[in-house]
Image (cartoon, coloured by chain):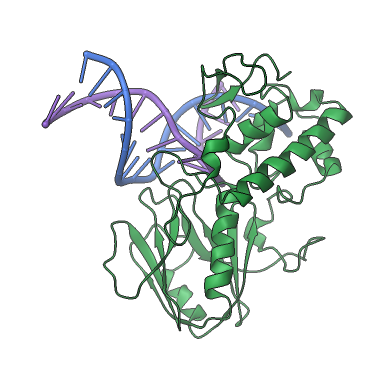
Chain colours: A green, B blue, C purple
DNA sequence: CGATTATCCTGTGCGC
DNA sequence: TGCGCACAGGATAATC
């Protein structure tokens, strides 16, 4: 559910609320949220200070003074919430991190797709990144807010797959999901079912510009919160970008550019919303 | 090899 | 009002 803008909003909240704070304890409930290794391994973090809250794509990376990296992915329904000490645990609370001088950090996730794990090692730092990426995330493409037109050209080259499929493929570009892929295609005036390899250089450049501008605008608006309010920030507040969606979820409504009705097409299991008149 | 599909879960909203 | 079913922001292993 959360895509790059929502995860980035959470990251900023973590950085401002918890950076420099010492971790007092970690408590994990159930088996699914910490599933890559024994949950008690997280006790290694106790006594460390959070040095930096970082992000690559939809993954949160918490770097600690002891040298450990805690990786968090919210998947479809995960939330991180800054909650007053000792207030009642809501249903589906799977982990609680207690900090010195700050509210508890709670991981709440009804569908239990989300996960937390300690990185086991790092690959060399990528260009433009201060910290190395955990080996577990080595398969990810460049972060969607950093990606260049040249990198996008490589990602789309030789791929007959629909453009939207490539955009949501985290190995190609990390951070774009179902909502923003549609919004980016609309902004770039490109049909989501265009074979990725058919994009001309000028179209790839347009796509790169739209990637940047749509994601930056969404980050500025603190992400998108849909009707089910599954995404909220650390304070429990909804985002504001949903009111700026141009095509996502708007089948039949007039295109904001040309007033023709927005179309919906099926895409394997997923669907894509687009304007058949002004996206080519 | 690359592209669909099935799966992990719970909650919600819709149609009957 | 109540029930059953389809569907949901994701990622990945299995299958075509």
Q: Which image quarter holds the C terminus of chain A? A: top right
Q: Residue A174, relative to residue A270: is it above or below?
A: below
Residue A275 in the image: x percent, y percent? 63, 19
Residue A78 in the image: x percent, y percent? 44, 53
Question: In this rendering, would A242 be left or right of A180?
Answer: left
Q: Residue A3, relative to residue A267: is it above or below?
A: below
Question: In this rendering, would C7 be left or right of A53?
Answer: left
Q: Which residue is drawn at 42% across and 59% down?
A: A33
The one nearer the camera, A154 or C15, is A154
Residue A228 in the image: x percent, y percent? 38, 41
Q: Residue at x 52, y 45 (%)?
A: A240
Q: Is residue A157 visible?
A: no
User: Across the whole image, how many numbered discs are drawn on residues?
Assistant: 0
Rendering quarter of residue A67: bottom right
Q: Residue A31, relative to residue A113: is it above or below?
A: below
The one nearer the camera, A132 or A200, is A200
Question: In this rendering, would A91 be left or right of A128?
Answer: left
Residue A190 in the image: x percent, y percent? 73, 24
Q: Residue at x 69, y 67 (%)?
A: A122
Rendering quarter of residue B15: top left
Q: Which residue is drawn at 58% across and 76% down?
A: A19
Q: Is residue A198 visible?
A: yes
The one nearer the camera, C3 or A137, is C3
């Amino acid at each position: 559910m959360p895509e790059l803008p929502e995860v980035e909003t959470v990251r900023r909240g973590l950085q401002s609320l918890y950076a420099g704070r010492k971790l007092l304890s970690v408590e994990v409930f159930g088996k699914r949220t910490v599933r890559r290794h024994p949950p008690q391994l997280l006790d290694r973090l106790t006594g460390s200070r959070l040095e930096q809250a970082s992000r690559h794509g939809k993954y949160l990376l918490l770097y600690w003074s002891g040298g450990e990296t805690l990786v968090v992915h919210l998947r479809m329904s995960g939330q991180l919430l800054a909650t007053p000490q000792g207030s009642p645990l809501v249903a589906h609370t799977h982990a609680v991190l207690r900090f010195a001088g700050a509210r508890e950090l709670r991981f709440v996730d009804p569908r239990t797709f989300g996960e937390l794990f300690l990185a086991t090692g790092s690959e060399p730092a990528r260009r433009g990144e201060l910290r190395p990426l955990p080996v577990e995330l080595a398969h990810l493409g460049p972060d969607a807010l950093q990606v260049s037109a040249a990198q996008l050209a490589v990602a789309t080259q030789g791929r007959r797959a629909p453009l939207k499929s490539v955009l949501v493929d985290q190995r190609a570009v990390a951070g774009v999901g179902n909502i923003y892929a549609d919004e980016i295609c609309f902004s770039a005036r490109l049909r989501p079912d265009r074979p990725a390899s058919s994009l001309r250089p000028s179209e790839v450049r347009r796509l790169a510009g739209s990637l940047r501008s749509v994601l930056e605008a969404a980050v500025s608006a603190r992400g998108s919160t849909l009707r089910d309010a599954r995404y909220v920030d650390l304070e429990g507040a909804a985002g504001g970008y949903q009111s700026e969606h141009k095509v996502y979820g708007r089948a039949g409504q007039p295109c904001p550019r040309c007033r023709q009705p927005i179309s919906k097409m099926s895409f394997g299991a997923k669907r894509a919303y687009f304007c058949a008149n002004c996206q080519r």
